[in-house]
Image (tube, rainbow, N blue to C red):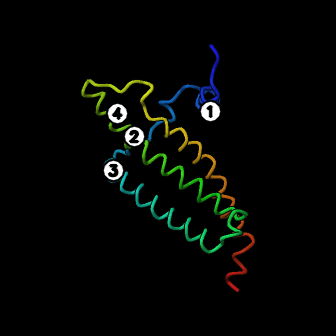
Amino acid sequence: MKKTIMQRIDAFLFKYEYDYFNRVGYSAPFISFFSMQLIRLILLFLMAIVWFMNLYINVKKCIIYMNVWALTYATLATGFLFVSSGRQVIERKLAERGDPVREKERSELWKFGVVLYAMAMPWVFTVNVMFFAFYRQDIID
C-alpha cells in the first residue's frame, strides 16, 4: 500500500500515537472548557490585532522582522487549536451518546496547530533574546 505525503508526515511527526499529542479537546481540571475556549478566543483576537498593527506600521519591511513570523505562527496555531478543540468536544460528546464520528470525518486541524506551535516557540524565544541583547539599550537611552 502506497502512503500519501500526509500519511508520511504523520508517521514522521506523530508516529501514529495521536492520543499522546492530541490533548486540545480536554481542558485542565481546574478550568471549564468554556472558559478555556473563551481565553483562546480572546488571545486569538489580541494576537490578530497585534499582527495587523505590526503589518500596518511596517508595511514593506515587516516580512524581514522575526517578530512577524513568531506572531504569524502563534496566531495560526491558536486559530487551528481553537477550532479543532471545539470540534473534538463535539466528537467526544457524540461518541458518549452512541453516535461516534467516522475516522475520516474527525478533526485533523490539531496536528497543524501543534506543528505551528512547535515552529513558533523558537521564533518567540529568539525575538526576546535579540530584543534584550541588542535593542533594549537603544530604547532606554
Q: Position of residue 127 (x, y in %)?
A: 67, 63
Q: Who is closer to the viewer here, 101 or 30? A: 101
The residue beneath circle 1 is 13
Q: Nearer the viewer, mark 2 or mark 4?
A: 4
Tell me if residue 39 comes above or below residue 2 in the rendering: below
Question: What is the CA distance from the residue labelled 2 to the residue labelled 1?
Answer: 20 Å
Q: Residues within 10 Å of mark 3 (few under 14, many from 20)?
A: few
Tell me if residue 36 comes above or below residue 90 in the rendering: below
Q: Residue at x 32, y 25 (%)?
A: 100
The residue beneath circle 3 is 31
Amino acid bearing label 1: Leu
Find out whether the residues at labels 4 and 3 contact each other: C-beta distance under 8 Å. Answer: no
Q: Residue at x 75, y 72 (%)?
A: 134
Q: Residue furthest front?
A: 60
The residue beneath circle 2 is 25
Tell me if residue 105 comes above or below residue 39 in the rendering: above
Find out whether the residues at labels 2 and 4 contact each other: C-beta distance under 8 Å. Answer: yes
Q: Which quarter of the rendered picture does the N terminus lie within? A: top right
Q: Is residue 138 left or right of residue 90?
A: right
Question: What is the CA distance from the residue labelled 4 to the residue labelled 3?
Answer: 20 Å
Amino acid bearing label 3: Ile
Q: Which quarter of the rendered picture does the C terminus lie within? A: bottom right
Q: Residue at x 62, y 58 (%)?
A: 70
**Which mark is drawn over residue 91?**
4
Question: Mark 1: which secondary structure?
Answer: helix
Q: Residue furthest top?
A: 1
